[in-house]
Amino acid sequence: MTTFALIHGGGSSGWDWHLVVPELHARGHEAVAVDLPTEDESAGWWEYADAVVDAIEGREDVVVAAHSLGGFTAPLVCTRRPVSLVVLVAAMIPSAGERFNAWWTNAGYEESGLDDVFYHDVPPPLVAGAKEHVRDEKARALSDPWPLDAWPDTPTRYLLCRDDRLFTPAFARRHARERLGIDADEMDGGHYIALARPRELAEKLDGYVRSRSA
């Protein structure tokens, strides 16, 4: 049985994945949506990683799926314990020693110029729920340099969202190639894909596991 460790993005919580978790369960997997210590001012990147490692203690076949800012945490988990696959979902890919605030310029980020870059395709009741679960990003991590010298030797896939207004498809394709040397996979949907299309996202994640097994 595969366990998916689900990592949320900036200012969010594990609640973002609450519709994906039962979809993964229905496909025969375990899924753990982790709450990162974003409101702990003393927490650095390793504390973020340890929160994930602690949440999946005792699991053997682990796939880490990380959304948006969660891309900074996912590779760190791979240095703490065995991980069979990392899936970056509309995620940021850090470079060695890079700080969060520098990532935007270093990565060549360009704004889409569109309104509502987060929730434009999320049903209104879920938008309200998401806003109720917003948390302050007070952790030291966002001002610390990313601590790895290189991306870990763990198979990694990048899944972009074709309707993403924050990390547009053109940017995400280039970002995956430049930072990891891989071609991104694609699906319909906006940035908050776990709320907008949870079933389709679960199907994608399940497909990665099945193709790996094949």
Image (cartoon, rainbow, N blue to C red):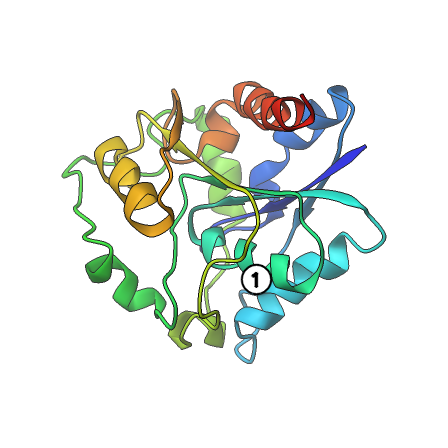
Tell me if 3 is positioned left or right of 178 in this view: right
Question: Where is residue 98 drawn, in percent x and y?
Answer: 35, 69
Q: Residue at x 27, y 31 (%)?
A: 169
Nearer to us in this view, 6 or 80:
80
Nearer to us in this view, 127 or 107:
107
Tell me if 127 is positioned left or right of 49 in this view: left
Report which quarter residue 155 is drawn in: top right
Image quarter of the C terminus:
top right
Q: Quick one: label 1, few (<14), some, or many (20+) residues within 10 Å? A: many
Image quarter of the N terminus:
top right
Specify whether residue 84 is in view. yes
What kind of element bears circle 1? helix
Question: Where is residue 191 drawn, in percent x and y?
Answer: 38, 35
Tell me if 48 is positioned left or right of 58 in this view: left
Q: Outermost residue, left direction?
A: 113
Q: Residue at x 53, y 70 (%)?
A: 45
Q: Outermost residue, right direction?
A: 58
Nearer to us in this view, 142 or 92:
92
Q: Is residue 46 above or below residue 115?
A: below
Q: Residue at x 39, y 75 (%)?
A: 143
Report which quarter residue 190 is drawn in: top left
Q: Is residue 128 above or below residue 150?
A: above
Tell me if 180 is positioned left or right of 206 in this view: left
The mark total stands at: 1
Q: Residue at x 61, y 22 (%)?
A: 211
For label 1, the residue is 76
Specify whether residue 19 is in view. no
Question: Where is residue 172 drawn, in percent x and y?
Answer: 30, 39
Question: Where is residue 189 drawn, in percent x and y?
Answer: 39, 24
| Type of amino acid under label 1 | Leu
